[in-house]
Amino acid sequence: MTSRKPITSDILRAFLPLKTFHYHDANSPITSLDFDDSGQFLLSCGTDESLQLYDVSKGKHVKSVLSKKYGCHMARFTHHEKNCLYVTTRSAEEHAIRYLSLHDKSYLRYFKGHTEFVTSLEVLPSSDTFISCAQDKTLRLWDLRLPSCQGLMKTTNPKMLVAFDNEGLLFVVGNPETNQLGLYDLKAYENAKPFSLFQLALPANPETGSITYAWNKIEFTTDGLKIIVGTEEGVIFVVDAFEGHLLAVLNGTREFSSRKYPGCGSVTTTPDAKYVYAGSGDFTIGLYDISKLEGVKQPVDLLPVHKLASDASTGLARSLVFNPRMYVLASADKEVSLWTPNEAVFE
Amino acid sequence: MSYRHGSGRDSLSKFFPDEDLDDESHYAGKSHRDDELRYNERYAQPNGSHYAQSGSRYATSHYSGSYERGRQEPERDGHESNRSLHESERSRHKSERNYNATSAQNHYDVDGNHYARDASPERATRHQTHRKELFVPNSAKFMPTGPKSLQPVKQPLPCLTYEYPNCTEHHHYLPVLEERLRQPLEPTSKKGFRVAYDPLLDKALKDKKGTRIVYRVCGESAKPPVDPRKRESTKHALKYRRRPYISLQKLHTPRFQYDEHSVGPPPPIEVIVWGFSLSTTPIQIRHQFTPFGEVKECEILAHPRTAAPMNICRVRFAGSIDKAANAARKACKAHPKGLLVNGQVARIGLNDSQGRLLQARLDKLRREEEAQVKRDEAKQKERQKARELERQREQEREEREKERGKEREKEREAERETKREGAPALELAPSFLSDILKVEKQQESMDAKFAKVVSNSVLTSKGRHAEIKPGVPLLDSIAAYIKGRPFIKVRRDDFPIADFVDRYWKGITAADLRATASRESYQRDLDRDVAHLDRYAELKDAARKYLKKQLSHVVKRSLATYDWARIMLEEDGIYVVFHDFYEARRCYEHEDGRRIADLDTLAPSEVNLVRAAGVRFSGYRLYMDFCLPPGFSSVRGDIVALATDPMLKELGNFLKRDIREKLIGPAVLAALDISNFPEHADVLKPEPRVPAEIYGIVKMEGPTLPLLPKIKKKDGFPVRLSRHAIQKRVVPMHHVLNFDSSDEETELDSEKHTPALSPKGPLKKRQRIKGYESEEDEEMEEREEIEEEEEVIDVEKAEREVTPDLGSKFMSDSSDVEYHTGDQRYHPATGGSRPVFEDDLSVPLDLDGLQDTLKDDEDLVLLKKVFSDIKPEPIANLDYWAWREKQRKLEAESALDARFDSAAGSWRCEGYRKVPDADKAEYLPHRRKIHQPLDTIQHEDDDSKRGGIQSSRVNRANNRRWAADVSSLGTESDILSLNALTKRKKPVSFARSAIHNWGLYALEPIAAKEMIIEYVGESLRQQVAENREKKYLKSGIGSSYLFRIDENTVIDATKKGGIARFINHCCVPSCTAKIIKVGGMKRIVIYALKDIATNEELTYDYKFERETNDDERIPCLCGAEGCKGYLN
């Protein structure tokens, strides 16, 4: 690893796919991607019921863990090295969330409680708590140390999305049907009353005309000022995290061809909270600049400032994650690709 | 067990005296409790299934956890449920005291799990003891037998009863139950809840908050939620939490390894170098790149067509792609502006996987070549055109000449006629007439000869169609000057002198006329005119001469670089005559067609004149004809002549000399022999004055080298011819071979001569040596030969020395002979005889000395004579006496201290007595103190210089380069792999040591911090080393030669290794060991801590680990001042 270089638009434009891994079974879609805290490891899990671990600093595949018994989805790293949480996909297995040590491929704990398919799993950035949202209209908080649920919240919609903020003080629950974002305090959520409820005034989808979208990701930016909402239709919304009004609408990415497996969203922000990468269905990744949205009253229409090009061998960027500490962008559809900036841009 | 609501509280207090039963802090509120208990009641089911249900949840974790805890520390805290024991129930429970033991058969724990009876005897006993308390949830099977009163009426909830004095809190399941009981069962998802406090998680708060999990249920609190980001306490709390994820402004750049998953082309591993000089070798270029990484190949590309090396080189790095790419990138970064190779700056660049850079360079080269070729072609075409033009002109000229020739003939005919008529001849006529006539004659003769002679008269003309024309018309007058030498002729047509003259004349005459013009008198004019006419002719003549002079000046100047003999300006052209054929040809080749040198070469005065005259020489081209007059012998023939000439001369000389020496000389001598002139014997001097030559003759009868001519001064003192010529030292022949020629120059005075040949005069640097004795013939002659370059011969001496008897013994009155040559030791001895060995008369002779004086029989005889007058002593046994004398001497030498004498006369009689070390040092050489260096090492060559202090860094760099060179020869095996450390080794040697057995000594002084030697041995793993250590100890090798490099590697020099193994330990060491990496491998190297003198023992601190067992400590024999006494 070399010394650190400040993030600039030039570097972000110069990303090239340098590695493509085909460790998942051929043609089995990959449903989630996650980097760990240090940015060194990448975890991908796919419908072939395996988890693949990659060492990103070298660009090598490290390990493959099979989970044939339970299936896997939504694999997330915890703050302990090489431990991950993932959701079982077999309904027979009680929809437990399993805590796996990737190092020795053994389970550490099962978190049982949900009765339906878990759609969302997020780990609190500052502690060992994590939150899971399932289709049984509940949202559960857990602590890694105890298998019992630490908190339960009833939701109204089975298709809710949840995300933590960057400091670990609150979490946001997004309701795609009502275009609402509710912010809940981690210390007082049991009443199921958010301290802030944002009603988003989303523009109508030009094709379908509806104002409801199929959300597939919610994310706070790393400075905690904006919330990014990614949708299946390819539009991305940037919402102010304090006031709740729509800051920007990011257009220009085409939606992906549908597949029956869920994903984890194709939107990701850079660690400096100024840029957003969004995968597009036409084998490109669009780069948006969201740094100049302070004090915006009307939602701004933004187009990508640059488009990174991939091809069929590199794959679509259905799932997209940016490394928290390195200039690496991971994209996955049926194969995992690692993008890094062209070395010439650093000279 | 039964749980009772509320009533059992007081009963509990007995058993838990210290507990504050009123403490309800861990209850959220009564209502909650009520709820809970009601829940319990409500959901108590006959088969206790709810326990089972929840049990499954808790079985793995809570149960086991609390079970453990229960074992160690029984929970003493009050449990509400325990408190719920009611006194009214006491009676009931009392009656259960005598609970039948049979129910013990069926043991159930809280959760309804069946315990095996023998699961644990401890448990079983415990179970048994308060079987009574156990109230088992029911199933028909497990209905307790016994008195009816004891039979449960309904399914009671389990409850603890502590009313029995023999009930102890150590019962294992009690705590479990407590645990279990104290935790409210998780509400099913009817409402949302939140765990506000969990003792297992927030252990720090356990004291404050208790051991119950605190839930906050939805709807409980009515506080409106607050944005936590705006809460003040957040910022403070943040500090103590694990740092959350915040925005980063700088990121690392990863470097991916290139493998089969990589997308895109592989990184470049090749570097292209271009722009270096063609004399560069690949090895030089390789050297420049080896610091960055291992170079796999380095090749200078060859031109595709001509296979000549181009100045493009390809350097490829070895290793994995990433390593090579790294090296290549580093190399290019390090030399952005170019690389200095072989004195020239070459450019480098990365050649990517498609080799684009290389292609670009090759293309560029090719284009340049093509351009060059085109240019050449263009030039050639030009030249051809020029030649064509020349040819044309030449042809035209020829035609013109022919015509002119014809015209002239006609003219001449006319002239002849007119001449007969007496008309004044034209200027040009006479010479040409004769010319032509002669030419005709010549031509006839030429023609006649032409057939035979090949190159009689060669005429080549460059610049035009090169042609050889025989038979050039040559005026006699000119020929007289040419004298048969090669010459170059510049034709008149090209250089029309007459035109010049005319022009010049015009220039002057106008002025002149103007100057002289006057209208005063017509008569005068007439006269003047007439006079003018004469003058005209004169002037013209003068002008012509002047111009001729100028022209010749100019021509001479322009041909100044050529060694011409003569330049003649004639009517028909300029003749440049050369002595030497080659010179002529050179001039021809270079100057033909060239313009005359510019005005610049003229002197300023001339320039003005010339300018004034309107004449300019410059700009005219000299079209030359190269001519060889008839009779000029061909070049080839000349060579033989050239070669043989000097040889013949030499032979002639030799012949003359021989005749002189061998015929004339002896004859003359014979004639002059004194014996022929008896009447003049007294008049004539004994040594006749003989010219030096004769002396030379006389001396040498055999083959000798010729003598150089001798120059004599007026006063008779011959002078040395060449002082500096003498470099050799004069030494008698049988000593010459003792010295090498390289040992010369020991004698500063190089002008020494043989003693015999010194003159009397006061010349410098001469030694006067008196006393000269007979010398041998050969020596004299040899000396002569040695110093043939210079002979300073005093004629008188010569005369003296020349005696009819050619044995040439020199006269005994050699007092005036001076010896100023040769070494003192080789001079003949003077004075009386001296003994060879000087005896010290103060010391009396002993037997040995006496025996020594006898060298041969004669001496014995003489000695007997000397001792004849001494009375012999009566000695019984001479042999013994003699031997005794000698022994005495020996003993005196090796006499030991009295301490070593044994009373009994012999040590063997006395038995064993240990000689202390201090004493041993006296007579054992290797026991002497270590700081007195031993002389056990014999130095063969004391004279050998141990090299000056060389810069070791430079040395090392040189050695590294050399080693890199050698290893770059490209052998597959590592036969030629060199151990670079051997180059830095200092000269050390092992010898007996005062410290222990053998030690390592420095043979030359070593400066501090210098590397001395590498500790070489077998490289072993840790485990192998341990094994070996044991083995060696077992087999008796007490010394340890194992040296640790790092945690896992040890060097063992016990059986195989270098001489560094001999270095002993000292508590005050002179060296230290360091581990350095050479070529990627770790090596142990011994460095000097302080300056080490010659013959000093090298020591260093072994750094053994401190041995705990005092018996096994090894005593240290170093004898240093700071000695610790033990090695470990």
Image (cartoon, coloured by chain):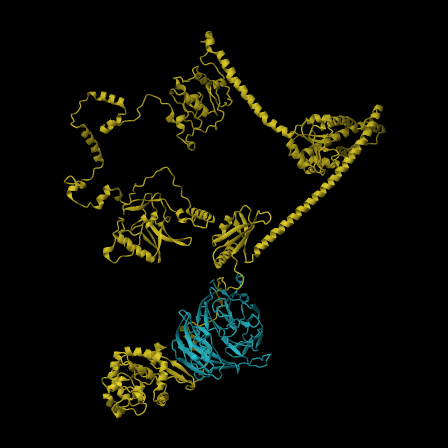
Chain colours: A cyan, B yellow
Rendering quarter of residue B813: top left
Figure quadrant of the N terminus of chain B? bottom left
Residues B632 and B56: in front is B56
Q: From the top left corner, tell me how far across and down residue B449 is, in percent.
A: 72, 27
Figure quadrant of the C terminus of chain B? bottom left
Q: Name above or below for residue A57 compared with residue B892.
A: below
Residues B669 and B272: in front is B272
In the image, what residue occupies the spot 36% across and 81% down?
B56
Residue at the outermost left position:
B904
Q: Work out whether residue B293 can be spotted.
A: yes
Q: Name above or below for residue B1100 compared with residue B446.
A: below
Q: From the top left corner, tell me how far across and down residue B1070 is, in percent.
A: 32, 49
Q: Work out whether residue B199 can be spotted.
A: no
Q: Name above or below for residue B634 compared with residue B175.
A: above
Residues A232 and B149: in front is B149
Q: From the top left corner, tell me how far across and down residue A231 is, in percent.
A: 54, 77
Q: From the top left corner, tell me how far across and down residue B636 is, in percent.
A: 63, 30
Residue at the outermost top position:
B679
Rendering quarter of residue B1024: bottom left
- Say whether residue B979 is left or right of residue B607: left
